[in-house]
């Protein structure tokens, strides 16, 4: 048992060093200190009598032997993750924990009332909500369920499309609504460069000069706050902007800003009772919000 535990720990250490390219990065990934990673690597190399990494310009680069070992480590990691998913997918108990991930705006505006209802219905299930704008890996169990806006969900995932998610341009409640031809000359609030949804980013690139963007944020909730503070116009989801009395629509939602709102999970987890319970509850209740999601209900 201890030998298996040591082997698993060794593989995780080597993979972390290779993926981060440094001991400090590996330590952060593994949530240990730098000296622990240094000591583990030294012990592994001593036991194998083989150097697995070389220092090059402050980075750790795998040797030929290291590359060979890492290929095996990645296969073992993938097989263990697949086994864990299959076993979790057979869990018929309405107890335990699960991880749900969603962007901040969806989590705050749409999810919280439903998670309260889920807690009341299934008190033995603990939900861990991971608020992140990135698409976390459901294959690697970074999350069990994702509620995401996307036009094309990954084919490797099992999903339910809830509704069309519309977005449009908003200004502050006390601001004068600009005419369509005046948009390019106004100040704008936008995503951090490279961080926004592709459809929204493409629309902004076509419509707005990048020099007109005076404020950037990786949070739609924060962007809405910036618009209320009169820092500029912003493209926001209608369910967020329409519900805020401090914001006003500038225009009807353009179709090329439409995306889909999806509930996603890994196919291996579909039979898990607790995951199915949350997916079913979220889907049934979010479907009733379709007029808010697709922009048809303006306030």
Image (spheres, rainbow, N blue to C red):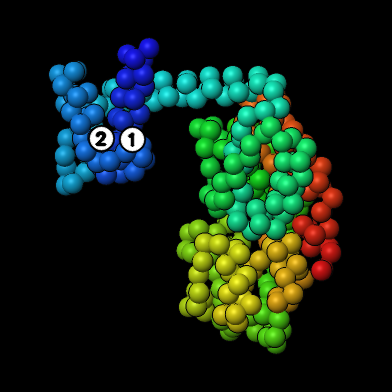
55 vs 86, left or right, is left
Residue 295: assigned label = none
Is 13 situated left or right of 46 in this image? right
Q: Is residue 29 above or below residue 47?
A: below
Locate the N terminus by quadrant.
Answer: top left
Which residue is pictured at 60% across the width and 56% down the height? Answer: 104
Q: Residues within 10 Å of mark 2 (few under 14, many from 20)?
A: many
Residue 184 visible, this angle? no
Image location of residue 273, percent across then percent down: 71, 26
Vertical placement of 136 versus 271: above or below? below
Name which residue lies at 31% across and 30% down.
13
Question: Disc 1 and disc 2: Cα gap in Å?
Answer: 9 Å
Question: Helix, strand or loop at disc 1?
Answer: helix
Residue 86 coordinates in the image, percent (x, y): 59, 20
- Judge depth for marks 1 and 2 and give the one in front: 2
Q: Which residue shows up at 20% across the image and 31% down it?
A: 39
Residue 223: horizontal and vertical position, in percent? Answer: 58, 69
Label 2 sits on residue: 37
């Amino acid at each position: 048992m201890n030998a298996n535990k040591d082997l698993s720990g060794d593989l995780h250490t080597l993979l972390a060093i290779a993926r981060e390219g440094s001991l400090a990065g590996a330590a952060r990934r593994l949530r240990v200190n730098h000296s622990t990673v240094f000591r583990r690597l030294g012990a592994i190399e001593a036991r194998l009598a083989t150097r697995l990494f070389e220092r090059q310009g402050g980075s750790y680069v795998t040797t030929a032997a290291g590359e060979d070992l890492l290929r095996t480590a990645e296969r073992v990691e993938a097989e263990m993750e697949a086994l864990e998913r299959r076993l979790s997918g057979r869990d018929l108990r309405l107890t335990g924990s699960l991880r749900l991930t969603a962007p901040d705006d969806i989590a705050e505006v749409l999810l919280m009332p439903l998670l309260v209802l889920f807690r009341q219905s299934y008190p033995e299930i603990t939900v861990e909500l991971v608020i992140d704008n990135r698409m976390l890996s459901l294959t690697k169990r970074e999350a069990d369920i994702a509620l995401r806006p996307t036009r094309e969900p990954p084919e490797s995932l099992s999903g339910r499309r809830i509704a069309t998610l519309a977005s449009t341009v908003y200004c502050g409640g006390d601001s004068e609504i600009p005419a369509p031809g005046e948009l390019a000359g106004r100040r704008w609030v936008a995503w951090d460069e490279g961080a926004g949804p592709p459809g929204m980013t493409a629309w902004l690139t076509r419509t707005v000069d990048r020099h007109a963007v005076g404020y950037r944020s990786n949070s739609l909730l924060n962007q809405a706050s910036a618009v209320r503070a009169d820092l500029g116009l912003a493209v926001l989801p209608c369910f967020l902007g329409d519900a805020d009395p401090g914001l006003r629509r500038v225009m009807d939602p353009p179709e090329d800003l439409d995306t889909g709102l999806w509930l996603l999970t890994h196919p291996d987890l579909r039979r898990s009772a607790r995951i199915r319970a949350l997916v079913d509850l979220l889907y049934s209740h979010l479907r009733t919000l379709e007029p808010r999601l697709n922009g048809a209900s303006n306030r």
